Image (tube, rainbow, N blue to C red):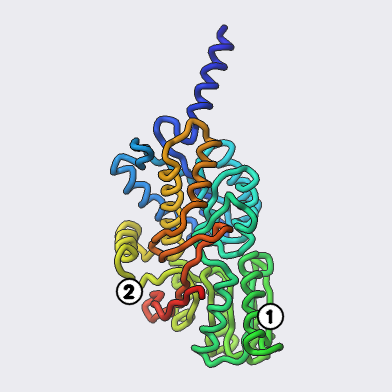
Amino acid sequence: MRRCVLLALAAVFLLSGAAFAGDTLKIGFNIPLTGDIPKVGESSRNAAEMLKEDINSAGGLEVGGKKYKLEFIYEDNESKAESAVNVALKLIERDEVLAIVGPNSSKQAVPAGGTCDDNRTPMISPWSTNPDTTYERPWVFRAAFLDPFQGPVAVNFAAKQFGAKTAAVIFDISNDYSKGLAEIFRDVWEKKMGAGTVVAFESHGTKDQDFSAQLTKMLAAKPDFIFIPDNYNQVALIIKQAHDLGWTGPFMGSDAWGSAELIDLCGKDCVGQYFSTHYAAAGAKGATKEFIDRFAAKYGYIPDDVAALTWDSTRLVLQGIQEAGEVKSSVTKMRKAIRDALASITQFDGITGSMKFDEQGDPIKCAVVVRINENGEFVFTEQVCPE
């Protein structure tokens, strides 16, 4: 008899759904709080916490005429691909979250995206730009533009801004994002400028600290500029070492430069350089400026693109929950309703810009190019939109 009662209670608990037990909705965050890029995880968590506090202080998220409190579960993927997969499984199976925000870096987002898709759990990556993150994965979405768009943005801007005819590239061979964007840049540049105009194409490992061998080869080739599609921590080392070797020419970067920690690590060596990214904090207006001002007042630094994209990604998930119309009694059914709602969003006005979504779950949105000024601010230079 006691066994039957326990089984009945267990069944009631499972039917109630751990992801919304006690009128609480659980969202998971698969983010790098340690490892190579911990500032990325910190920025994501800070943005998410600010949004959660806004909603919970107003009584919760309204779904079908009823308000539900939000619970955000932050798990550290250690900036590692295998850890990102384990975190995804933990959030899905142990915590029974309704959806997952992150991972950010493509190195973690590509494998974790496969895990979420296999387990039919909605995932949205704020920052991953590698096409493989979402490709043929109907449960995976993103808030960032893709590298096949970002690559030509960098090519065209560098050619125009620097009057460049030749380029050199250095990238992380073990990072899907860095390797993929480097290859796209090389192919687009040589199609535009001619075969052989990428005069050096050098790779390195994620843990490398000394880039002198690669940089010596690159400088000997005398490129007009150097393209670095690396994470901000690697960028700081590469630029400093290039200057130490006598390089005085320009660099062009990509959105992985856009961390609030870049200037702390790079200092004056990065002043005057350009990179493509998702939004420009300096000179922002409207809702974007309001977000920036609130974030800076709360956390003591200007939010980087990761923070802004996490804000947009989390809002997209919450919109998906609301558009599901009701909180269903089954986690599995609720996940499916959220996925379907996300797939049906045709346009979303975020603080990183207005975006529409294609059949892969990828946003069609504009990129911006920013310049790092003498105060370490990322200043808007120009906007480039898909044709």
Residue 335: x percent and y percent? 53, 41
> Mark 2 = which residue?
283
Q: Nearer the viewer, residue 336 or 88?
A: 336
Q: Nearer the viewer, mark 1 or mark 2?
A: 2
**Residue 201's mark?**
1
Mark 1 to mark 2: distance in Å? 35 Å
Secondary structure beneath disc 2?
loop
Q: Are marks 1 and 2 in contact (CB under 8 Å)?
A: no
**The residue positioned farthest toward the right in the image shown:** 196
Residue 208: x percent and y percent? 65, 69
Query: Dividing the picture into quarters, in which one does residue 72 lie?
Result: top left
> Is any part of residue 31 visible from this angle?
no
Residue type, mark 1 in image: Phe
Residue type, mark 2 in image: Gly
Query: Dividing the picture into quarters, in which one does residue 21 lie?
Result: top left
Mark 1 crowdedness (10 Å alpha carbons): few <14, some 14-19, many ≥20: some
Mark 2 crowdedness (10 Å alpha carbons): few <14, some 14-19, many ≥20: few
- In the picture, measured across the screen, residue 169 lies left or right of residue 249, that is right
> Is any part of residue 144 visible from this angle?
yes
Look at 55% across and 36% down and name the residue there. Answer: 332
**Residue 285's mark?**
none
- In the picture, measured across the screen, residue 223 lies left or right of residue 96, that is right
The quadrant of the rendering that contains the N terminus is top right
- In the picture, measured across the screen, residue 191 lies left or right of residue 371, that is right
Residue 360: x percent and y percent? 58, 58
Residue 205: x percent and y percent? 67, 68
Secondary structure beneath disc 1?
strand
Look at 45% across and 83% down and name the residue there. Answer: 272
